[in-house]
Image: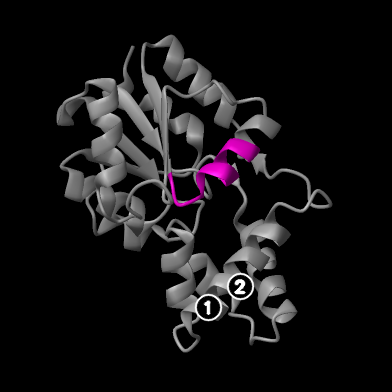
Amino acid sequence: MIAIFDWDGTLCDSIEHIVCSMQHAAVELATEPPAAADIRDIVGLGLPEAMTRLFPALDEELRSELSRAYSRHFSSPDRGPPLLFEGAVETLERLRARGIELAVATGKSRRGLDRVLGALGLADFFEATRCADETRSKPHPQMVLEIMKARGKCRDEVLVIGDSEFDLAMARQAGVRSVGVSFGVHDSDRLAVYRPLAIIDQLPQLLDLEVFAP
């Protein structure tokens, strides 16, 4: 069995960090900053896809400049690394103790994910990771399919855990089960459309699900 986690908004409490970084990038380039709700709504997509949704009237060159400015603000040492949600590491450790493999499928870039995993001391914690800049962005199922192939798993041995409809749509398109978390970017009603096994309010509640029973 392998549990494939989204990163931002599922394991990592980084949403406000993302919102502030995106708004600062827009101001820096004299562009109207998107509303916080609009930024939250695209968390989980790859950066090019997110920029297209947030700034549809801008040309590709300016969106690329905004992407670079966003990345610079997000990784600024003045901000420090985002923190994981309460109970995240303990939950992951207990899943591993039950023989569950762990993976990450994220809209972050490879450079961004490696940087934050290193800062949190988790560089070697996951059996597999996939990022949007090295495969297809969610909700395309490619990240899940690549992890399945790399780890030799069939569909009934995979569970995706995420906070956005992009995560659960990715799982559905890959033909695997999912669990939604209610404390991220999309509310429970939006997540419920994708018929996850459960929608949890705290990460430790994963340990109570039958699919992860010891």
Question: What's the mark number on residue 137?
Answer: none
Element assignment for label 1: helix
Q: Amino acid at mark 2?
A: Glu
Q: Is residue 157 visible?
A: yes
Q: Which residue sits at x=49%, y=62%?
A: 47
Which residue is denoted by mark 1 in the rendering? 61
Inspect the magenta stretch and tell me whether residue 147 lies in it. no
Q: Nearer the viewer, residue 185 or 175?
A: 175
Start and end of the magenta stretch?
A: 106-115
Q: Which residue sits at x=43%, y=76%?
A: 53
Q: Amino acid at mark 1?
A: Glu
Q: Which residue sits at x=72%, y=80%?
A: 27
Q: Which residue sits at x=38%, y=25%?
A: 208
Binning the other alpha carbons within 10 Å of mark 1 as few (below 14), some (14 to 19) or many (20 upward) gives few
Q: Is residue 38 above or below residue 168?
A: below
Position in image of residue 18 (x %, y %) = 62, 60
Which residue is denoted by mark 2 in the rendering? 65
> In the picture, which quadrant includes the C terminus?
top left
